[in-house]
Amino acid sequence: MEESLDAKIDALLNVENMRLADVVGTKKAVVEIVELCYQAGAWKTLNDQIVLIAKRRGQLKQAVTAMVQQAMHYIDQTPDIDTRVELIKALNNVSAGKVRLCLDREDYVRAQILSRKISPRVFDVNLSKEKKKPKEGDNVVQEPPADIPSLPELKRTYYELMIRYHSHNNDYLEISRCYKAIYEIGSVQENQSQWIPVLRKICWYLVLAPHDPMQASLLNATLEDKNLSEIPQFRSLLLKQLVTMEVIQWTSLWNVYKDEYDMEKDMLGGPLVPKAAEDLKLRIIEHNILVVSKYYSRITLKRLSDLLCLSLQETEKHLADMVVSKSLVAKIDRPMGIVSFETTINCNETLNSWASNLEKLLDLVEKTCHQIHKETMVHKAVLKL
């Protein structure tokens, strides 16, 4: 009997090996495996197979979900309390609290792997709306029991854990996006005492994030949020200054916002990351360099240092870092002490520019000839009269 069960399980595991090519077949295979173990009364084999299937490389979330849901039906059918406890432990091992546990253990690599097994789109499913009949192989979100947290609560828990993960890497843009997702939860939007601290965090981490297209897009979208009128110091002074092409004086900015910065530790979500103050100054310096590059094609290193309120060595270091990160195009002529922000134009671009200019010139000549011919005809007509 045991050999027959093992043979059937091995055959189904061979089907499960095709998981990346056949989602429906994989779900059926893992469900049949747990059913076979249950029918044979092989509870230890059932526990082992649950753990084994869940740990397989590249395992599908749909397959693990179907397996766990099927095995949950057998909890009340266990022959004794010890068997029931072991089954619950096996199911809990593959389903509950693993991202949080990895973060508590500071196992950030495994936490990232586990976080990718959760689809954030599920949190936005509206269960109250009528849905079309799902196709075979589709994800189906069922109404949870009364003792299970709702989707909005799970969404908030998930993004709070992801904030902990991204804080470890000082990934400010991703932290801001996580707070943005929490900010959009209905229960948070309805409570001003909750959304104001979250919106403050969004503003802080957007300012701390390095400049790139995604950061600029989120920054402009946040500026259009009407709720920012409740925290005008963030809208008119902090965010507005960063989208304005003007040099920002770091000392005056810090004097204004130092108290606001210190207040964050007493608000929802706790203090900002330890390096936040240092990185805020760095972002202001980078903003100022980008502003200067918009208005100057060439500038002396000394004048640039004066504008940035930095030493020559510090200015050169920040310029080099921005060039290496490809957020700025610049060249430094050290003997002459000149910084050039002009981009190098290759031969093809030069020829294309000439061709475009010639085309415009010929078009203007043609229009001029037409106007001259028109005027000549008008004057000839007048003379005949």
Image (cartoon, rainbow, N blue to C red):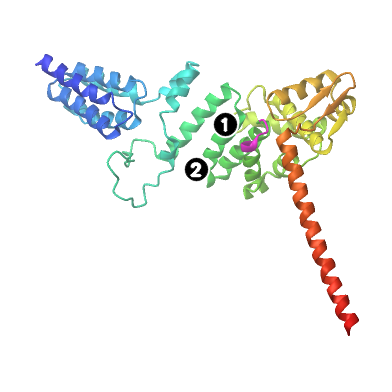
Residue found at the far left of this picture: 1
Is residue 185 within the magenta segment?
A: no
Instruction: Say which residue label 1 marks.
Output: 174
Left or right: 119 in relation to 23: right
Residue in view at x 78 percent, y 60 percent: 366
Kindly tell me whether residue 349 is visible in this rendering.
Answer: yes
Left or right: 25 in relation to 367: left
- Give the class, few, some or many, for how many residues have Cα within 10 Å of label 1's Cα (few <14, many ≥20): some
Q: Position of residue 257 (x, y in %)?
A: 74, 34
Quarter of the figure with the C terminus: bottom right
CB within 8 Å, label 1 to label 2: no
Q: Which residues are magenta?
A: 210-215
Q: State whether residue 97 is above or below residue 290.
A: above
Residue in view at x 59 percent, y 34 percent: 176
Q: Position of residue 49 (x, y in %)?
A: 24, 19
Q: Quadrant of residue 354?
A: top right
Q: Quadrant of residue 143?
A: top left
Residue found at the far top of this picture: 3
* Nearer-the-camera pick, 54 or 42: 54
* Nearer-the-camera pick, 221 or 200: 221
Is residue 212 within the magenta segment?
A: yes
Q: State whether residue 372 is above or below residue 349.
A: below
Q: Position of residue 337 (x, y in %)?
A: 88, 22
Left or right: 26 in relation to 324: left
Secondary structure beneath label 2 = loop
Secondary structure beneath label 1 = helix
First in sequence, mark 1 or 2: give its number: 1
Q: Quadrant of residue 312?
A: top right
> Which residue type does callout 2 highlight?
Ile
Label of residue 185 in the image = 2
- Give the class, few, some or many, for how many residues have Cα within 10 Å of label 2's Cα (few <14, many ≥20): some
